[in-house]
Amino acid sequence: MERIRIYFKPIWYNIIHHKAYAGFCVFGTMLTFVFITILLQVAYVILCDTAPAVAADRIVSVPFVLRDNKGEAVKGLNKSDIRTLMNNVREEVCYTSYHYEAVDIIVNGRYDEYGIYFIDRNYWNVFQFELLQGHFFTEDEMQMSCVIVNENFVRSFFPDKSVINKEIQIEGNTYRITGVVADVSYFAPQGKASLWVPEKFSKNESNDWVETYILYPENMSTETIIRSVTNAYQFFVKTYYNIDKSVSVKQISTEKQFIRKMYGGGLFLSGVGVMVFILLVVPVLNIVLLSMANTSVQAREIGLKRALGASKKTSFLFILVENVLLVIMGTVLGILLTVPVCCGIDWIVFSNSIEGQMMLLPELNWTIIFISVLPLALLFSFLSGGIPAYLTVKRPIVDMLKGGTK
């Protein structure tokens, strides 16, 4: 322990006596890893099966606008159309249809305009939300004026967080809260939803179209699933609307395929890599230049250690460890600030959204931090500290003893 203290004491001394450099290094690293952490967390949500679509590769969306072979809209599919279409699906599946409306709500005397999902009972079987309080709609409650909310809605309107059986006003009618579900990311399927009401209470003022999602069994391949829905859809439009080749068929896809396509498909992963590269390289270059200036100031001290017998390796590690400590401090601060920064982004972007209480990231995925963010932090520290350390220690001792001038 004493040897460790003796080793780190001069490193800490240098950090304390070069506050400007240390502050810039920590602050630059902190900003870098705030945005790298957010970027990697969002990429994980988009690329992997996260709640509520934990079976995204088996959930298929049915096009809710029927178009003819020329792409002209024929009609929007309603609940009756979906029941007829589903009669042509041969496999044992679970499906849900819901209708979205923007309505006026009053909660604890506060007026707001909100987006509400009018759902059937199967909705919670297809989309696996984590239940935090209460319960999902029972069969009897599907006939009653009940509502389920997400936890962000609770934070906004109920500071005490005790909401079960409390009431809110929707379009002048009273609804009782029966459950609270966990927040999900805005980038996840159903990430824009925050209020759910039984489908019976949908007024269908604008239209009666419904969005439909079908959950297939685990033992089926993606190709088989898509073919099953496609065949059923084509039979439906041919039989009831005499359309041979509806262009709507091209829109049939799994939720995983749809989300990836929406965010750029195969280019998304490349884009993430490019953005991470830029976020690393720009601050690395700045810190390398500043570190070179800082080590130049310390050149005489390093040269004296070399003259007294310190090896190049020891001198190199001395400079590198100092930089690693600064980068680790900046990385930890960046990770800790990720959630507050996301909350700020939520407030700026989503606070006035008609769709409801949405979040960029409801929580941090620590697996991503340990397997991606921390290794990037080590790479960052080795690049930003290793390059100037190497350039310094390879110089002749005589040059360093002159104060760093060549």
Image (spheres, rainbow, N blue to C red):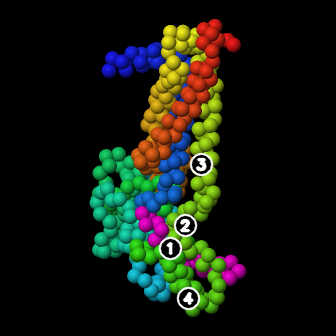
Give the residue at mark 4: 235
- Residue drawn at the location 45% of the way across and 15% of the way down: 10
Q: Nearer the viewer, mark 4 or mark 1?
A: 1
102 or 398: nearer the viewer: 398
Give the residue at mark 2: 257
Which numbered marker is on residue 273?
Answer: 3
Marks 4 and 3: in contact by CB < 8 Å? no
- Whole-number angstrom distance, CA of label 2 to CA of label 3: 20 Å
At numbered mark 3, what does the secondary structure look like: helix, strand or loop?
helix
Segment colored magenta: 53-78
Amino acid carrying label 2: it is Gln
Classify the position of the C terminus by image quarter: top right
337 or 98: nearer the viewer: 337
Q: Percent position (x, y) of residue 253?
A: 55, 72
- Whole-number angstrom distance, CA of label 4 to CA of label 1: 20 Å
Which of the two labelled residues, at mark 2 and mark 3, occupies the earlier sequence position? 2
Residue 75 magenta-highlighted: yes
- Whole-number angstrom distance, CA of label 4 to CA of label 2: 23 Å
Give the residue at mark 1: 222
Q: Nearer the viewer, mark 2 or mark 3?
A: 3
Amino acid carrying label 3: it is Gly
Classify the position of the N terminus by image quarter: top left
The quarter of the picture where residue 247 lies is: bottom right
Which of the two labelled residues, at mark 4 and mark 2, occupies the earlier sequence position? 4
Which of the two labelled residues, at mark 4 and mark 1, occupies the earlier sequence position? 1
- Whole-number angstrom distance, CA of label 1 to CA of label 2: 10 Å
Q: Percent position (x, y) of residue 60?
A: 50, 73
- Residue drawn at the location 56% of the way across and 66% of the way down: 258
